[in-house]
Image (cartoon, rainbow, N blue to C red):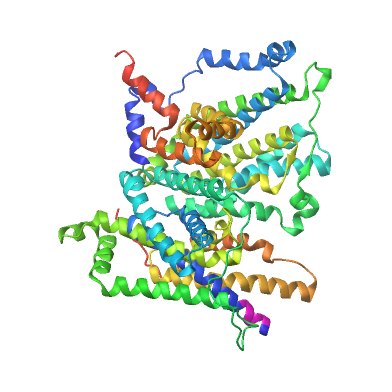
């Protein structure tokens, strides 16, 4: 990991590319966000975009937030987690329980879910600190496999309703806004994502972010420079869990349902796939990754059916086969993900100077 | 008392499977420093292959060697084709490739043999003897099969020139190369052997957990736990660790059951098996990462 990262940052060129110096967010990104925010007005009111597609878009944004959380940990801090589905589950369950049991307002549950996930992530990150590389991957792998069973624990049942899960209802838009619930939630999710991406950008460009990357690239040198690597690593774990937890909470609200079996190992894998595909140490990669995850989840079935019928395979391929093949092929061709691959392509073809 | 013995016996039987998986993991870890996250799914796939052969009417004693040969080939091919180019790749790439392999084996098994749960016939004759209340014939078969496999491996590593070459390649690749050992092929052979060991574990455990693409997830977790308890750098330790976690797993459920009967309070039971494995993994990793029998690696700065 370390070697590719350092060449990547070095290749990025002069001092302007150093992550420590802040650059304003480009205008076209703001324009894109404004366009996205106007979508319910444009597409929704004219009937061009149905509620179904707003739900899909919301899910894509939610997965982008989750992948962003994983990117902060794995991409910027170099800690590999195969178990982030666990934090997704914690966020989703905190929100669902607060709404279902304590009848809280759904927006008020979001900060609580984030705080809960930060604490859980920090506590998990604390002992996991001593684990490096493979061992951390192994511990989080174990976490991912144990999660659904843990959620079914008998004494949590009054809160979690065991295997049946919790049903919650989609909130209506406030102030009598002429929007459907799906359109309203799309706006809520979009707003959360914009805030979380700006915060992530600031973290990465701050003292904290530089410490995270220093630990990733040269742990020993980072220690020598006076960086408290234990503290930085466990706080990063907490922040990462907070992001994923928010994604889980939003997912619970837009999906209106949580159950132990929605948080199986596949979810953790999906997040990892998203992070790797987008580009593990980029913020923009998280958007690509999140969109890819939802796209595969939605259309992989159709895609595999199409492949099966055009190539005349004797068996019906499953979406996971595509996941696996994409993962392996990508590791050979674009180990920095699509965003990283595009960035290095751009550096090759851009005019010198 | 009889119940306790029963639990210990079935713990040992499960432990035999964990020991095999742990050994397969350690064999790959020692030589390449990789943790094979796809080991469980590979074993599951092998069990399906064996089931298919049985279904085509071959006898078990034909199907098992054929399955082992198949798994060996797959293991060698994976090492040669997929992992060879990644020898110097960053850790994340390696982990991601293993996850990719896991996904491929899992979904291929589902695609070829569907996700419906299938019974798997026990290869061992159903005889009864004095203590059959404590331990069943298949459980004895599991223990004998696993121990036999371990013995065979031990002898081939200890007493054959090939085994010596493989150990040399794993311990010190540079020196091994200097004395003329083809280290690359030794690694591939190690992968093949690990896959074979895993396939035996899959076939032996299939009659107990039934055959389906998800069957190995929990078992692999216990395999990991066993490897870590024994020390992931020590093959002998991993085997011991496998048996230890097998018995421990059943003891925890047994004690939980006793507690519930005595006080009426349910703390832990069969439903928490995976959580117990998670706790074992994290405890060992934080308190004694080198395990009971592993040697501590000292990094030179």
Q: Is residue A188 above or below residue A77?
A: above
Main secondary structure of the magenta stretch: helix
Which region shows up in magenta?
B3-7
Residue visible at 61% across and 32% down in the picture: A298
Instruction: Name the image quarter holding the C terminus of chain A.
Output: top left
Of A5 and B33, the residue lying toward us: B33
Q: Is residue B4 magenta?
A: yes
Which residue sits furthest front? Answer: B57
Question: Can residue A280 be seen from the camera position used here?
Answer: yes
Residue A212: x and y in percent read 45, 39
Q: Is residue A316 magenta?
A: no
- Quadrant of the image occupied by residue A92: top right
- Quadrant of the image occupied by residue B75: bottom left
Residue B42: x and y in percent read 46, 55
Looking at the image, residue A21 sits to the left or right of residue A85; the answer is left
Looking at the image, residue A80 sits to the left or right of residue B248; the answer is left
- Quadrant of the image occupied by residue B163: bottom left
Q: Is residue A18 above or below residue A47?
A: below
Of A297 and B268, the residue lying toward us: A297
Which residue sits furthest bottom? Answer: B130
Q: Is residue A276 above or below residue A28?
A: below
Residue B21: x and y in percent read 47, 63
Of B37 and A37, the residue lying toward us: B37
Question: Can residue A72 be seen from the camera position used here?
Answer: no
Which residue sits furthest left? Answer: B179
Residue A223: x and y in percent read 39, 46
Residue visible at 23% across and 70% down in the picture: B161
Of A228 and A126, the residue lying toward us: A126
């Amino acid at each position: 990991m370390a070697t590719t990262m350092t060449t990547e940052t070095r290749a990025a060129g002069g001092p302007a590319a150093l992550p420590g110096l802040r650059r304003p967010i480009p205008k076209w990104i703001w324009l894109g966000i404004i366009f996205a925010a106007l979508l319910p007005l444009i597409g929704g009111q004219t009937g061009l975009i149905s509620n179904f597609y707003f739900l899909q878009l919301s899910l894509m944004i939610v997965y982008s937030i989750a992948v962003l959380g994983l990117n902060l940990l794995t991409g910027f801090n170099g800690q590999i987690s195969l178990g982030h589905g666990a934090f997704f589950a914690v966020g989703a369950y905190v929100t669902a329980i607060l709404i279902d049991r304590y009848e809280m307002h759904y927006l008020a549950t979001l900060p609580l879910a984030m705080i809960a996930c930060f604490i859980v992530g920090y506590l998990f990150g604390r002992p996991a600190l001593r684990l490096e590389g493979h061992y951390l991957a192994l511990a989080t792998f174990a976490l991912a496999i144990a999660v659904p069973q843990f959620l079914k624990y008998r004494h949590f049942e009054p809160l979690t309703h065991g295997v049946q899960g919790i049903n919650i209802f989609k909130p209506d838009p406030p102030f009598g806004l002429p929007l459907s619930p799906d359109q309203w939630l799309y706006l809520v999710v979009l707003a959360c994502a914009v805030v979380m991406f700006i915060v992530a950008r600031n973290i990465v460009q701050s003292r904290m972010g530089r410490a995270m990357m220093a630990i990733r690239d040269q742990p020993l040198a980072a220690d020598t420079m006076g960086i408290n690597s234990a503290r930085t690593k466990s706080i990063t774990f907490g922040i990462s869990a907070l992001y994923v937890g928010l994604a889980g909470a939003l997912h619970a609200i837009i999906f209106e349902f949580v159950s132990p079996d929605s948080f199986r190992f596949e979810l953790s894998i999906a997040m990892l796939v998203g992070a790797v595909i987008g580009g593990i140490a980029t913020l923009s990669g998280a958007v690509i990754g999140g969109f890819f995850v939802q796209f595969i989840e939605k259309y992989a079935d159709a895609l595999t059916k199409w492949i099966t019928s055009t190539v005349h395979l004797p068996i019906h391929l499953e979406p996971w086969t595509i996941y696996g093949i994409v993962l392996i092929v990508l590791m050979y061709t674009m180990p920095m993900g699509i965003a990283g691959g595009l960035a290095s392509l751009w550096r090759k073809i851009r005019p010198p100077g | 008392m009889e119940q306790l013995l029963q639990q210990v016996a079935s713990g040992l039987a499960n432990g035999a499977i964990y020991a095999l998986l742990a050994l397969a993991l350690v064999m790959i870890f020692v030589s390449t420093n990789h943790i094979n996250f796809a080991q469980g799914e590979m074993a599951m796939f092998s069990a399906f292959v064996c089931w298919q052969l049985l279904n085509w009417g071959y006898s078990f004693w034909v199907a098992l060697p054929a399955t082992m040969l198949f798994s060996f080939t797959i293991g060698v091919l994976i090492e040669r084709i997929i992992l060879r180019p990644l020898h110097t790749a960053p850790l994340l790439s390696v982990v991601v490739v293993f996850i990719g392999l896991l996904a491929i084996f899992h979904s291929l098994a589902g695609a070829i043999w569907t996700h419906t749960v299938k019974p798997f016939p026990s290869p061992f004759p159903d005889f009864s003897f004095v203590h059959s209340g404590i331990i069943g014939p298949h459980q004895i078969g599991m223990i004998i099969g696993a121990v036999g496999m371990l013995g065979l491996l031990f002898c081939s590593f200890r007493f054959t020139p090939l085994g010596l070459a493989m150990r040399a390649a794993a311990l010190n690749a540079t020196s091994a190369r200097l004395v003329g050992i083809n280290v690359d092929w030794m690694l591939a052979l190690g992968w093949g052997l690990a896959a074979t060991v895993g396939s035996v574990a899959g076939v032996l455990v299939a009659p107990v957990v039934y055959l389906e693409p998800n069957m190995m997830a929990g078992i692999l977790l216990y395999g990991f736990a066993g490897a870590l308890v024994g020390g992931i750098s020590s093959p002998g330790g991993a085997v011991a660790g496998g048996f230890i976690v097998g018995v421990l797993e059943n003891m925890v459920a047994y004690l939980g059951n006793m507690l519930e009967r005595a006080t009426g309070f349910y703390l832990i039971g069969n439903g928490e098996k995976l959580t117990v494995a998670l706790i074992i993994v994290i405890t060992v990793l934080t308190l004694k990462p080198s395990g009971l029998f592993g040697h501590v690696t000292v990094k030179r700065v």
